[in-house]
């Protein structure tokens, strides 16, 4: 039906290090709790990529997933191994749950699944009436917990770009409204109720440029328009855009565009 083993029982036999390997036709569920002393918690290597094991981590590994571990001595937790056929059987009427377990993943859930592993371990160690049936039911519960957690994680990841797009749109609307005044990134972030770091991270993820660059680009766009299509002096344009020092504005413009405001105007006039 399944195999259940504690992390210390398995890892201590191998000096707390499990070399990368894979299992044919076996699905594994891990719950790993490194020592809580704030030090290095070890790492898991999944398909060649290293993941820290601190804080606690849940891992789901389908058959043929390459994995290895370097545990800190004293790490606690469990590993439950099920034949893929058993997993197929216990989730036969829930194809969505089975699909959620198709890819390997390491994640850090808000709620610990330790209680399910403890129940599996207790039943596995016992010999009571209906042990196989109880283990089958617990296997279904464990698989369902992991499938739900992974499905929720995937839904959150899908929603994140939408939330980011909404934040970026609000930010760009503020920039469009206020580009003629000197507003810092911290001012925009405060108005949006986020940190400057988060705002820049979202902007960079969706546009490839930090939020501060988007602010500058909008101001420079207006400067180029004024230089090309009006007779305003460079100093007037600088003041219009909130720069108190026209010389500073000229330096900012030249650094961003590669030419001075006067050179840009002359080039546009010749076109």
Image (tube, grey):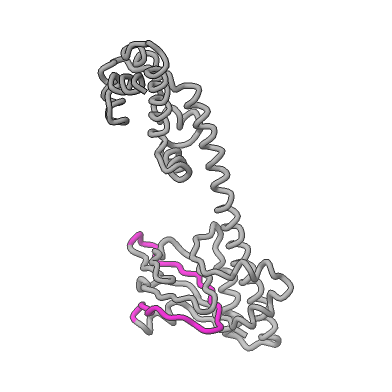
- Please state the horizontal and vertical placement of residue 163, each as a whole percent of the image: 56, 43
**Image vertical order of residue 110 relative to residue 264, above or below:** below
Please report the bounds of the magenta region as a residue range: 15-39
Residue at horizontal 60 percent and vertical 55 percent from the top: 155
Choose between 5 and 238: the one closer to the eye.
238
- Please state the horizontal and vertical placement of residue 184, each as a whole percent of the image: 39, 27
150 with respect to 219 (left or right): right
Q: Quadrant of the C terminus?
A: top left
Residue at horizontal 45 percent and vertical 32 percent from the top: 189
Q: Is residue 249 visible?
A: no
Choose between 232 and 25: the one closer to the eye.
232
**Image vertical order of residue 12 relative to residue 152, above or below:** below
Residue at horizontal 55 percent and vertical 48 percent from the top: 160
Q: Quadrant of the N terminus?
A: bottom right
**Image vertical order of residue 247 relative to residue 195, above or below:** above
- Please state the horizontal and vertical placement of residue 212, each as a whole percent of the image: 39, 33
User: Which residue is at the far front?
Assistant: 271
163 with respect to 207 (left or right): right
Choose between 109 and 147: the one closer to the eye.
147
Q: How many numbered callouts?
A: 0
């Amino acid at each position: 039906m399944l195999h259940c083993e504690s992390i210390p029982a398995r890892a201590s036999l191998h000096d707390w290090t499990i070399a990368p390997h894979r299992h044919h036709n076996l699905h594994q569920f891990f719950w790993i709790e490194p020592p809580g002393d704030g030090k290095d918690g070890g790492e898991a290597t999944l398909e060649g990529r290293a993941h820290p094991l601190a804080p606690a981590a849940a891992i789901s590994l389908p058959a043929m997933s390459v994995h290895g571990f370097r545990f800190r001595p004293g790490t606690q937790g469990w590993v439950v191994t099920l034949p893929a056929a058993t997993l197929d059987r216990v989730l036969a009427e829930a194809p969505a749950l089975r699909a959620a377990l198709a890819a390997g993943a390491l994640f850090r859930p808000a709620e610990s699944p330790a209680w399910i592993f403890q129940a599996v371990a207790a039943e596995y160690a016992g010999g009571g009436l209906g042990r196989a049936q109880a283990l089958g039911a617990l296997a279904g519960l464990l698989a369902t917990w992991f499938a739900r957690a992974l499905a929720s994680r995937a839904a959150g990841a899908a929603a994140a770009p939408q939330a980011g797009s909404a934040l970026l749109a609000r930010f760009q609307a503020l920039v469009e409204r206020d580009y003629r005044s000197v507003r810092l990134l911290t001012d925009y972030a405060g108005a949006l109720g986020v940190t400057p770091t988060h705002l820049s991270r979202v902007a960079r993820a969706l546009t490839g440029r930090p939020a501060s660059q988007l602010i500058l680009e909008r101001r420079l766009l207006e400067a180029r328009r004024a230089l090309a299509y009006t007779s305003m002096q460079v100093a007037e344009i600088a003041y219009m855009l909130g720069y108190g020092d026209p010389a500073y504005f000229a330096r900012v413009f030249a650094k961003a565009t590669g030419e001075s405001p006067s050179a840009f105007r002359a080039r546009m006039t010749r076109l």
